[in-house]
Image (tube, rainbow, N blue to C red):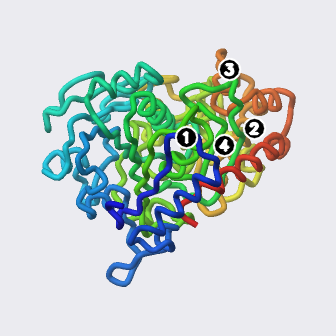
Amino acid sequence: MRGHDTGRDHGGHCMKLSRRSLLATTTAAVAAGAVPAQAAAGRAGTEGGGRRLRTGFERLAADGYALLDGQRVGVVTNPTGITRDVRHLVDVMHADDRVDLIAVFGPEHGFRGTAQAGGSEGRYDDPATGLPVYDTYLKSGAPLADVFTASGVDTVVFDIQDVGARFYTYIWTLFDCMEAARLAGKRFVVLDRPNPVTGRAALGPVLHKEFATFVGRQPVSQAHGMTVAELALLFNAEFLDAPVELETVRMSGWKRSDFYDASGLPWVPPSPNMPTPETALVYAGTCLFEGTNLSEGRGTTRPFELLGAEGIDGRWAAAANELEMAGVRFREAYFAPTFSKFQGKTIGGVQLHVHDREAFDPVRTGIGLLVTAKRSFSGFAWRPDHWIDKLTGSTLVRTMIDAGADTDEVVAGWQEELAAFRRIRQEYLLYR
């Protein structure tokens, strides 16, 4: 086996794997490599007397790119695909004779990240490297497989920073690219990065398949508590029609309890409205306001931390604080979005202030804010297209809130399905 110290896992073969056989293969790959099994499971490495995280790309590069030897390579990435010294991995690999990098594939917002939500950069040649950049956004199945075929690659590499929420589209870019690579007969490699809001627990409602869209293709909980490599193993064994030839390169030095600041890595906004790790901390709950007529804070310097609408006053913040949500307080706030909902208008609402991130539950908080917004603001309305159902994964949240349910009752409504997902999820966790 090449590249023993990359911590790579074989996650797919030419036949459908059960969860347990997939895990047995993963365990065998760890045992065969030079990386101790404890390190593969997330034991802290030491450097200078302290723990240092090494991303999947760092470990791939340290192994001399042996995993990519003899392969024509394409990379699915965006501005978050950086090294510790903030060089982009495409620039690094392009300059290295040990890698035959021939293509780049851009997701929503684009490879260089210039497009807003719901947009991409299209097909172009990258000015810095001359490499062809192909657009994957809103492509899946055979059309995306055709893109991989036309690019001439043998191996597709995925390296994008996720934020831990089911409706953040990059994990479904991962899913769609895995499926397309299988259809095109390409090998697929996932380079792991940390879940910035920890990998401690799965939270929130689980998507029902009839509500599958690009903000949720498969029955995953609203906050999944997994890394992209773990999700890739889950997708390959549970959700793809047949597995792709998959390998993952794990991190070393990451613990499931780590927030992003423990990584020592620079933060690059994965999308224009995800400016800080603090945004990611609340996003899995407050993004639900995209499904309402209230602003979710787009067009402000605090997207997803500021929420509001015309006609809202201090009563909403007061009602939210009465819920005594763990780890968070709510401030009456007024703001004027520069784009998106209520552009150029001064509106009222709340700002979330998380004071104990260990105790904070973003999904429960988001539900509490929806319940209190509907009760304290007569102008509250769901988006006419029932986008809230696509975000939450079913009609449960909307119909229960409309029926007058309180926060505890809504949260109780998804616990059985969440418990089932947690049992499945447990089998694919690489870091323990």
Horizontally, is 172 left or right of 352 in the view?
A: left
Task: State the separation of the CA atoms marked 3 and 4.
Answer: 19 Å
Task: State the separation of the CA atoms marked 4 and 2.
Answer: 23 Å
Residue carrying label 4: 221
Which kind of residue does numbered mark 4 sit on?
Ser
Residue carrying label 3: 386
Query: Horizontal and vertical percent for residue 269?
Result: 38, 44
- Residue 132 found in image quarter: top left
Which kind of residue does numbered mark 1 sit on?
Met
Residue 351 showing in the rendered view: no
Task: State the separation of the CA atoms marked 1 and 3.
Answer: 39 Å
Identify the residue at image location x=61%, y=53%: 21
- Identify the element where label 1 is drawn: loop
Q: Are marks 3 and 4 in contact (CB under 8 Å)?
A: no
Residue density around tag 1, few if under 14, some if 14–19, many if 20 or more, within 10 Å: few
Disc 3 or 2, which lies upstream in sequence? 2
Disc 2 or 1, which lies upstream in sequence? 1
Task: State the separation of the CA atoms marked 2 and 1.
Answer: 50 Å
Identify the residue at image location x=54%, y=27%: 214
Residue extending furthest toward the top: 384
